[in-house]
Image (cartoon, grey):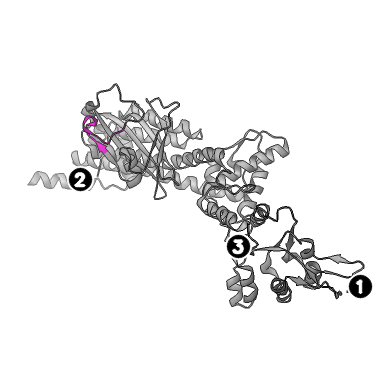
Amino acid sequence: MNIYTYEELAALHAIAKIIAQPIDLREQLEQVLQEMSSRLGMQRGMISLLDREKKEVWLDVAHDVNIDGLEVTYKPGEGITGKVAETGRPMAVANLGHETHFLDRTGARRNLNRAELSFLCVPIIYDSSVVGVLSADKVALEVEKLDKELALLSSVAELMAKAVHIRGLEEENRRLRKIVGQTRAPSMDIIGHSTPMQEVFGMVAQVADSNTTVLITGETGTGKELIARAIHNNSPRKGGPLVQVNCAAIPDTLIESELFGHEKGAFTGALTQRRGRFEEANGGTIFLDEVGELSAAAQVKLLRILQEKRFQPLGSSRVINVNVRIIAATNRNLEQDILSDRFRADLFYRLNVFPIYLPPLRERGSDVILLADHFILKYSSEMGKHVKRISTAAIEAFLNHKWPGNVRELENCIERAVLLSKTDTIDCQHLPPSLQIKEKDIEKKDKSKLSSVVEAQERALIIEALEETGGNQTKAARKLGTTKRIMQYKISKMGINSKLFKKKASESNQQ
């Protein structure tokens, strides 16, 4: 076990306090690097963030290194920083003058004697994944054991892991705002840059030019209507109508009239002739939303038009031929509904020619921040307010929330928050109670995690002092520069049995 000195523990305490402050993340990380320099002698500290898509890292925050105007990146395995990011394992160099893999891309050591410097580099790991890299120099003569220095730097990395994770998401989204839309099909009014959404965009681009029937599946609130609109707008039919039908809202008795139309007097209440939705969509696209809610009778009628591409309005002898592209959507598992005889298998196979699965918001990673920014601009403009950003604490709440209502829930949440905010920032107090409760739980959990490193090392230091003093609490307190009263409190709190050390000392004296 690596046992830290009280000075090192004090530094870890100071860093933990910085991380707990509600300040800008970049400023927070810069203060941590300052503490590393002034308290631990770790100079030219640098924090690099991992690009999750490209797997390369870019230098984001530095201390005692001028990175203004520099775009410093490392590909996977490139240099020491790239290797640490790729492997997730710490690396140390005792003498930089002998290290050929050290790139010094910032030029910070160009005028220094590298032979006098050691270099330490550790991964920053959050939720079992590498999110960044922390590195620093230290005067070689001040380094007793490289392993101990790496362990200390790793403790610092553990304390800052969540802050670096969120900082990475913020920077990633800042970059993506510049290129958003460039990798998507043209005229697609959908926000998202996560891998699952890129796959959806690719499928939309692939199917839009054809007349193929599409079935969009996904949870409520994921934006299935937007995908249907994107397919229509990027197809040769974009000059024709896009007719939307909410299948769940039409009673069984009216479904045939709604879809196919009727003649005057076809049934009681049919006072005029009416065109059906399929006839209205001729030359364009019909979007059958919530198609899984259709009754068995309605399913038969829909299957008929899919097979024959023509129909007769109610009470009419005329046959109408239509040229319509069909897009259907459902939040149900239709394959499961087939097994329970709730949905016709033949209709399912007619609709499921080209399936597109729309992922829920909880599977879309940092898209939640992109979407939140979009809704902030939208509702700030509508309400005439000047809300521009989301606080770090609120971002944490967003990232940890499961979003059962998906994008629709997020939009409602932002609309409420913009309305409540009296500044330019959305904070936790502006969020719905369901998000605030979870934020409190997360805060308690994280505080426990942040302090665990310091508490473990403090316990080890006290035990070492008791061993050296034969269990004498007064001498142990003096050795650690504290009082007997505090020592007794710590021993009691940590459940340390000081009598064991007296017994060991007695046995040692008898030998």
Foreground tag (1 vs 2): 1
Q: Quadrant of residue 354?
A: bottom right
| Marking on residue 501 | 2
Query: Which span is picked out in magenta?
Result: 92-103
Q: Per the image, is 425 magenta?
A: no
Q: Is residue 135 left or right of residue 425?
A: left
Residue 488 placed where, x, y %?
A: 31, 40
Q: Is residue 18 left or right of residue 310?
A: left
Q: Is residue 198 visible?
A: yes
Q: Is residue 473 visible?
A: no
Q: Which kind of residue does numbered mark 1 sit on? A: Gly
Q: Is residue 468 left or right of residue 358?
A: left
Residue 445 placed where, x, y %?
A: 45, 48
Residue 237 placed where, x, y %?
A: 70, 56
Q: CA distance from mark 3 to mark 2?
A: 66 Å
Callout 2: SS: helix
Residues packed near mark 2 inside 10 Å, few (<14), some (14 to 19) or many (20 plus): many
